[in-house]
Every structure is written in C-alpha cells, then in structure tokens.
Amino acid sequence: MSTHPRRWFPLISLCTLAAVPGFAQTAGEKVKDTVNDGTRAVKKTVHRAGEALCTGTKAECAKQKVINRGTEAKDAVKDKVEEIKDKVD
C-alpha cells in the first residue's frame, strides 16, 4: 500500500466536506421565499385567466401567452437565484 499523498486526497476531501455544516436560511429568508412563491402563483393565475378571456385574434392571444410565459420564467429564475444566494450567504 502506497502512502503517497495523492492516494489519500480523495479520502481527506470527503472527510473535510462531511465536516462542513450545510447551508441554512434564516427565518426571514424563508418567509421571503414563501412570499415570492405566492406572488408567482398569483401572477400565473392572473395570466391564465387573461389568456382564457382573450378576445383578440389568435396571433395576439398567442403573443400575449408567450409574453406571460417569459415573464413567469424570468421571475422564477430571479427568485431561485436570490434563494440560492441567500442559502450560500
């Protein structure tokens, strides 16, 4: 059995990572995440209702639907980035 440092590196790395505490959010950050989730859900519901009641041409309705989906995706990504940033901080 070799005692070369490279052989021990994976084991030492795993032990070191196991000793690092997990990322945690504060209560305020958790509340903010919950509020963001609720806000996104309300916006999604309003968008779907507007799409269902669309009285324009098919092209106009499809355009609004694409815009709504883009807005929802942008909001979701922004919120997830904030959430990850809060967990790391």
Image (cartoon, rainbow, N blue to C red):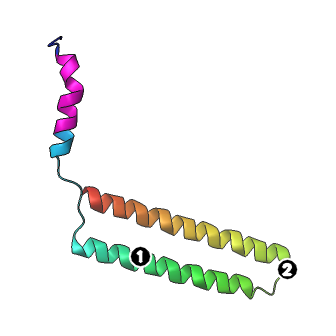
Q: Which residues are magenta?
A: 5-15
User: Circle 1 is placed at which residue position?
Assistant: 36
| SS label for mark 1 | helix
User: Circle 2 is placed at which residue position?
Assistant: 57
The quadrant in which residue 80 appears is: bottom left
Which of pointers 1 and 2 lies earlier in the amino acid sequence? 1
10 Å neighbourhood of mark 2: few (<14), some, or many (≥20)? few
Name the kind of residue labelled 1 in the image.
Asn
Who's the residue at 46% across and 80% down the image?
Answer: 39
10 Å neighbourhood of mark 1: few (<14), some, or many (≥20)? some
**76, above or below 56, in the image:** above
Residue 32, horizontal then vertical, whole percent:
33, 75
Residue 22, horizontal then vertical, whole percent:
22, 54
The quadrant in which residue 33 appears is: bottom left
**46, above or below 17, in the image:** below
Residue 85, horizontal then vertical, whole percent:
32, 58
How many labels sit on residues?
Answer: 2
Q: Main secondary structure of the magenta part?
A: helix
* 56 with respect to 68 (left or right): right
| SS label for mark 2 | loop
Q: Residue furthest right?
A: 57
* 36 with respect to 48 (left or right): left
Residue 44, horizontal then vertical, whole percent:
57, 79
* 62 with respect to 89 (left or right): right
